[in-house]
Each structure stands twice: as C-alpha cells, then as structure tokens.
C-alpha cells in the first residue's frame, strides 16, 4: 500500500468488502505502507467518484467517504480511518522505511516491524493485510531488500491467520499464465484459504480470505452481488 493510492477504485472495493465482512468482528488492519513512489501514475483511477449513478449505490458510505478524502486532497490511510470510511478497531501502519544501510540491519528491522504488527493486532479476530504488490514465496523475499518490502511473504500471511480469519490483498499479475491460474496457485499455497474475491475494474486484484466463517462467506457473496460484473467469488 502507498498513500497515493487512497481513494482509487481498488480502495472502493477494498473498504466496502472489509466493512461487509467485519460486521460482527473486531477488525485489525496491517497496512504494509510503502513510501510513495513517483515513477508511474498508479493510483490515478479516481474518475469513478464522479460517476455517482454507477457506483455510489453499491456502497454509499464508502463512496461518500472516499470522495471527501480525494476531493479534499487528504489521500492517506489516516484519513480513511478519521473519516470512518473503514470501521476498524486496530491499525498497524508504521511505514516501511528505514535509513539503515546494511542488509543485515535492514533485515533485523523488517523482522521487528512484523513483530510490532502482530502485537498491535493481537486482540483482533479478523485481520486484513494490505501489501503494495501482494503475496510472494518466502524463498523470493529478501528481508533486507527494501524493494521486497512491497510484497507479503507467504509465511506472514499464514501467521496473521492463526486462530482467526484473515484477508490478504494481492495485485494480480501474469504469474502462472493468467489470473485464474495465479489465484488457484496462491489458494493452494496458503493452505487455509476458504475462498477468494476478485475485483476487475481497470486492473485485477484479489482478496484471499483465510479461515472464513459461514457468515463471512455469505457477506462476501452479497458484496459481490452489489458490485456487479466486476466482482466474483472464487472457491478452490
């Protein structure tokens, strides 16, 4: 996650889905908050906020809240919480940035960062992990490599889901020869994935739901119905 993405079409899907699934839970959010980059125009998809007739009725409070955040120029995760776009009980949003120079020092810092995240969300029975890019295998993650901090190691997703429900964001790519195959790959790797929620506006992103209850499943299906043709539920 980067602050510059706040309010884009992906956020509309993200926060409306989380509000739907957390109705009877204590929600904690782990924002894997990466410093804003300027090498591309990611996060520019906010025109949907001017298309009130098409989008607002699908999640009115989220739509209105994000519209206020974007139009006011306050595109950061703190505004999402302050404006109650997302009903959340605990957040961990320490930015993934350090001036440490050696790889070993950065690796230690990143490991301690995750320990702080776990402590912050320890009292929550539903957690959401929001990496900038999405899941990756532990073998391809360098704890001391700053660019790798845009991704979420598979083991961290599994730890966050221990004894509770977890939702993990993943930005789809061409990995494994197509989004459908990619999603099935990660569902198998996660091991405790009950279902996935795919949202395909402008670009495709998937929310993997681990250890879901029946109420979570029902809420996700109802959410997808409201979102229309851009959303689908995927079962393994």
Image: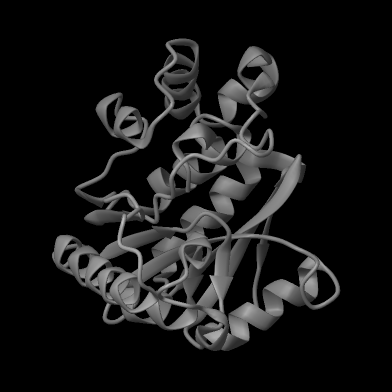
Q: Give coordinates of residue 220: x percent, y percent.
A: 52, 55
Q: Give coordinates of residue 169: x percent, y percent.
A: 52, 59
Residue 125 figure quarter = bottom left
Q: Quadrant of the C terminus?
A: bottom right
Q: Give coordinates of residue 61: x percent, y percent.
A: 42, 25
Residue at coordinates 48% horizontally, 39% vertically from top-left?
A: 36
Q: Quick check: 131 above or below 2?
A: below
Q: Residue furthest right?
A: 177
Q: Is residue 65 visible?
A: yes
Task: Locate residue 42 relative to residue 142 in the image: left or right.
Answer: right
Task: Locate residue 88 relative to residue 199 in the image: left or right.
Answer: left
Residue 197 figure quarter = bottom right
Residue at coordinates 32% horizontally, 27% vertically from top-left?
A: 79
Q: Residue furthest front?
A: 101
Q: Give coordinates of residue 199: x percent, y percent.
A: 67, 50
Residue 182 figure quarter = bottom right
């Amino acid at each position: 996650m980067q602050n510059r993405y706040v309010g884009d079409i992906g956020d509309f899907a993200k926060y409306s889905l989380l509000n739907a699934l957390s109705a009877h839970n204590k929600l904690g959010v782990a924002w894997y908050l990466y410093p804003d980059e300027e090498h591309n125009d990611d996060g520019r998809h906010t025109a949907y906020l001017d298309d009130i007739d098409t989008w607002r009725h699908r999640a009115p409070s989220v739509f209105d809240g994000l519209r206020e955040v974007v139009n006011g120029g306050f595109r950061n995760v703190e505004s999402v919480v302050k404006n109650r776009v997302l009903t959340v009980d605990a957040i961990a949003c320490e930015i993934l940035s350090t001036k440490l120079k050696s790889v070993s020092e950065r690796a230690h810092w990143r490991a301690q960062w995750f320990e702080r995240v776990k402590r912050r969300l320890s009292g929550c029975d539903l957690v959401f992990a929001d990496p900038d890019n999405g899941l990756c295998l532990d073998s391809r993650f360098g704890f001391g490599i700053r660019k790798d901090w845009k991704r979420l190691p598979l083991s961290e997703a599994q730890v966050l889901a221990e004894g509770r429900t977890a939702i993990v964001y993943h930005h789809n790519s061409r990995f494994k020869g197509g989004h459908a195959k990619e999603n099935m790959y990660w569902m198998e790797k996660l091991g405790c994935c009950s279902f996935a929620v795919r949202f395909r506006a402008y670009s495709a992103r998937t929310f993997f739901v681990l250890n879901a209850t029946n109420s979570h499943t029902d809420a996700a299906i109802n959410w997808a119905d409201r979102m229309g043709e851009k959303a689908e539920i995927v079962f393994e």
